[in-house]
Image (tube, rainbow, N blue to C red):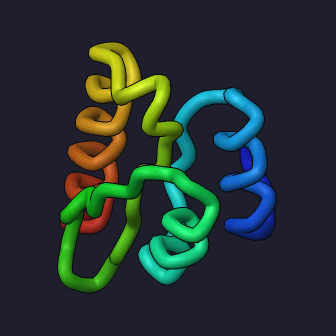
Amino acid sequence: MEVMQFTAACAMVEAGCGVAVVECLASQYAASHGLISKPLNITSDLSLIAVWLPSKGLAAAPRKILAVLADTIKRDMQH
């Protein structure tokens, strides 16, 4: 699902809807709401983080999806 604001994405994560990918500027907001964030380290031009609930952890499936997403973005940015 795509939303226009990182606050909406973080609210969905807080509600237990899964993992969100947002701009790195949202990391302080996510932390203030008790969420975990981790940089995706895609490129120096694109700063994105993954955000999830600490109580749910980051399971294997979302971890794989984030890796595929990062690889796809890197590949697309090279073209």
* Residue 55 placement, left or right of 6: left
Where residue 58 sits, quadrant-wise, is top left
Residue 30, percent across and down?
56, 64
Q: How many marks?
A: 0
Look at 76% across and 35% down and name the residue there: 15
> Which one is in front, 72 or 28?
28
Residue 5, percent across and down?
77, 69
> Which one is in front, 42 or 24?
24
- Which quadrant: the C terminus? bottom left
* Residue 9 placement, left or right of 47: right
Question: Is residue 49 shown above or below 19?
Answer: below
Residue 74, percent across and down?
22, 58
Look at 35% across and 75% down and name the residue there: 47
Look at 19% across and 64% down and name the residue there: 41
Question: Is residue 11 shown above or below 66?
Answer: below
Look at 24% across and 36% down and name the residue there: 67
Where residue 69 sits, quadrant-wise, is top left
Residue 50, percent across and down?
41, 51
- Which quadrant: the N terminus? top right
